[in-house]
Amino acid sequence: MASASASSALSAASDARPIGVFDSGIGGLTVARAVNQLLPQERLVYFGDTAHLPYGDKSTAAIQAYSVKICDLLLRQHCKVILIACNSASAAAYELVREYVGSKARVLNVIDPIVQYVGQHYGGREVGLIGTKQTVGSNVYRKKLDSLDRDIRLHALATPLLAPMIEEGFVRGAVSQSVINTYLSDPGLEGIEALVLACTHYPLIREQIAEYYQGQVDVLDPSDIVAQALEQLLAQHGLATADTARAPQHHFYVSDFTPSFEESTRLFFGQEVSLEHYPLWE
């Protein structure tokens, strides 16, 4: 019979399996970067479906098909958690992915953590949201916030030019500022007290958005909030990796490779990464 101390050692056992993160491209690396900063001992396997980006203008059925196939790859990599680091895929495929993955891994999306955060901090207030056409059109944020019954009045605006602009490296300067100002001055966002950046690309222009509002509006970057939710999930289910002196070896896959993707990954992840071409669709 195992002793009490042996039992507690088992319950506190480390789970060194990786965390799978996927996105329609490389924008989800902003979430991966936040996870890496908060949980530096966790190993990441990232898949960017660059062959199909952006997901924001794809049908729900197409996004679901892509997501399931990517999950197969991440499960083959023995991922203990699959983090859908894409708002469009979180809106279109989260329930299906959770059902498909079953007990093989935990599944986390980027929508629920920010919805809970807004519910806790902005009850009875006007909250803005910018994202892709798919995310805004799905109404997923509105439905989830309404279900909290916190009298949060959501002002959602589709901003389809922002993600491709950021992908092309326009994150500082006259071009990006002009596009950002045009969107943020839309009458639909008038009177908001907080703005949710409902696309994983948008943290890269957070400073410019904050400058536009000059401290009058709270600009909410979901990546840090999602990383905290992941930390809680790992602790809750005994899935955390023990601290080690050696940094884990992350893997970054893309379904279509161009040198510009590799260049942009440094921008999104905040450090040098080596992209591996994984032609999942061939």
Image: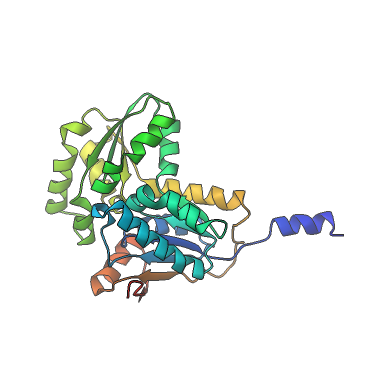
Quadrant location of the N terminus in the rendered image: bottom right
Q: Position of residue 24 (x, y in %)?
A: 32, 60
> Where is 274 relative to 47, above or below?
below
Q: Residue most toward the front? A: 61
Q: What residue do we see at 42% from left, 31% from top? A: 147
| Residue in front for this viewpoint, 4 or 111 | 111
Quadrant location of the C terminus in the rendered image: bottom left
Question: Horizontal placement of 28 versus 191: left or right?
Answer: right
> Where is 72 relative to 218, above or below?
below
Q: What residue do we see at 12% from left, 47% from top? A: 178
Quadrant in the rendering for residue 29: bottom left
Q: Position of residue 67 (x, y in %)?
A: 38, 59
| Residue in front for this viewpoint, 4 or 104 | 104
Q: What residue do we see at 80% from left, 59% from top? A: 6
Quadrant in the rendering for residue 65: bottom left
| Residue in front for this viewpoint, 256 or 231 | 256
> Where is 23 relative to 134, above or below?
below
Question: Horizontal placement of 157 versus 79: left or right?
Answer: left
Q: Does residue 132 show up?
A: no
Question: Horizontal placement of 50 versus 33: left or right?
Answer: left
Q: Does residue 178 show up?
A: yes
